[in-house]
Amino acid sequence: MHDVPLLINITLALVAAFLGGILARRIGLPTIIGYLFAGILIGPFTPGFVGDIDTIQQLAELGVIFLMFGVGLHFSLSQLWRVRKIAIPGALLQTFLATLAGIGLTRLWGWDLLASIVLGLSISVASTVVLLRGLMDNKLLNTDHGQAAVGWLVMEDILSVLILVFMPALSSTGSAFDWENLAFTLLKAAAFVVIMFLVGTRFIPWLLERVAHTHSRELFILAVLVITLGTAMGAAELFGVSLALGAFVAGAIISQSHLSHQVGADVFSFREAFSVLFFVSVGMLVNPVFLWQNLGQVAALSSLVIFGKLIIVLLLALVFPHPLRTYVIIAIGLSQVGEFSFILGQGGLSLDLLTSNQYSLILAASLISITVNPFMYRLIPPLERLFERLPGYREKIKHQSQISQLDEGSLKDHVVIIGYDRVGKHMVDVLTSLKVPLLVIEEDVDHIVELGKRKIPALFGDASNSEVIKHAHLEKARVLVSTISDEIATSLIVTRVRDLAPELTIVARSATREGVNELAALGANHIVQPELEGGLELVHHTLLELGFPLRQVHEYAQAVRRDHYNIEVTSSDEHRSLDDLLTAFEGIEITWLKLHQDSLLVGKTLAEADIRAFSGASVVALIRDGKLSPNPKSNTVFEEGDRLGIIGEEEQIETARKMICNEAPCKIE
């Protein structure tokens, strides 16, 4: 058997991480928890197979590089600037106070000052991954509160990078602080950043552009890897700064290029794979026996991370003039520590500022806080109710709750719009400009406040699972439009509206073709699938550029919509569409083909036959038992004796004839 320790350790770590990640997701926890526990299981402190920690940690360095490269690639100075009034001072003060709290706690335990500083800094920064997941799961990411939390994390990321720069200076201070060494470290870091942003911002995008024009995906990916690893190694070897800083700067430079999205997509797999190895290597350093013997310290540090940081942020709400809800959401989102804490802790470990047991405490606090964090979001309403009773917070509660009262008596011949996201806002803008009376139902209180400022009637609540829709006076409305993308919620809304107002026209949004059929069955009159409509718009412009007549292009798009949406509506308007079709296609003759017993189409639906894709010709009518059906539906099942009316060019008609008639003469003159 070949001696391949590197391959064995990679395989072992990835298999353990995979099983741990699957288990974590099964019980509703972030996968990072599973990766850390996988590292504990194959670590030197637990029985069974033990991985080579030195080998895995060397691979984990790549994880640090790609993690920091990803942070730089997605770094948004403009996003930070939008929420600068709360994010910059808030993150600075919170980091400082949380660090002091960590220092104070560990000094009580008898730790030396440098170890206490490293731990304090490690617990002061939160995990970006965990925060984003929590905001997305609770539909808070796109709110003003969520954006403030993200900006806060961006500022913490910047601070973490600066801490990584300072950390080598701390390791060489000894008993007295070496200001000269710190100044030299800062000078080298500043020189690296200046050179990269003066030279790198010109050279790196230029290089990527040239490689992209080779039309070789392999070379492009290789160029990205060379830039990432080369910059990180150059930063460490030439300027004496950390690999992490070099990778962050490389990502920040590439983020300015129009190719940044492609770079992010190409490096994603490398980042995920090596970051998994990083988390496994972190778990391998945890000594469960030490943690069990020091449960009091584990509980105290975890409580400081979960509750101490939460209290610090809520106290800051008294200082800055922002709504309390913003601080509640930020406080809950930041009450955990993650990947940056590991990176800072590992930096302290490698510089002998921390012992492995001290690092284990940071990891234990991280495991516990990340596990608890998803459940913390349930505390948002209770915390708001609690702080409403406390002096200093009442005015903030009142300020954020100023929602204009709805005059229900004025609702008549109105359009009810459910959802005030980007689609809903566009709908509101159009109807407002046309002076059409409307009512918006929205579950985000900030959007309700915004609508109140615009003097637009609105109801606060979730239309899919509350009684709020009863107050929309659907019996007086003209149309109801659901703009939300959640198909389950939309199904509940359509069902509820049909019970309350059987005759009301419902326009709904669906994300999938299956959703289109389900909403149609529940009673929605018109259903729109944005992805399909966007594709048809691209087709529309493309066919016009190719010289196809506008009417023909329009009819093609309508035929695709008819087949896709498949809403069973038959009316006199639909019968007149055949005459409209004949008028639109002057000089184009409808060809009639009769289905014989041996026709390949008998027993198939129009969708299954897919005549248009096979031949290019379109089925525009069907005659069965002497009854004309224009624009047959996609679920129409063909029968023997059916006569199909098709249009198209001569070659397309001939191809369709062979398919439909199975080479038999079936053209009706």
Image: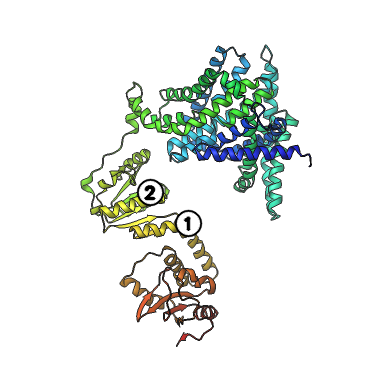
Mark 2 sits on what residue? 489
Residue 469, x across and y down, in percent: 29, 47
Is 94 in front, or is 8?
8
Q: Residue 613 or 25: which is nearer the viewer?
A: 25
Q: Is residue 50 above or below residue 496?
A: above
305 lies left or right of 488: right
Residue drawn at x 41%, y 79% is 642
Label 2 – label 1 distance at C-alpha = 19 Å
Task: Please tell me in which quadrant of the rendered image residue 41 appears.
Answer: top right
Q: Residues within 10 Å of mark 2 (few under 14, many from 20)?
A: some
Classify mark 1: helix, strand or loop. helix
**Residue at the bottom extreme, as displayed:** 669
Q: Residues within 10 Å of mark 1 (few under 14, many from 20)?
A: few
Q: What residue is shown with label 1?
A: 531
Residue under the point 60% across and 22% down? 289
* Residue 480 quadrant: bottom left
Q: Is residue 521 above or below residue 400?
A: below
* Place of residue 197 in the rendered image (x, y in percent of width and height, measured from the top left): 66, 37
Number of labels in the image equals 2
Q: Say whether residue 436 is visible.
A: no
Q: Amino acid at mark 2?
A: Ala
Residue that sits furthest to the front in the current view? 48
Relative horizontal placement of residue 622, taking residue 14 as reference (left or right): left
The percent coordinates of residue 405 (x first, y second) are 26, 39
Q: Is residue 113 left or right of residue 306?
A: right
* Rendered view: 467 above or below 127: below
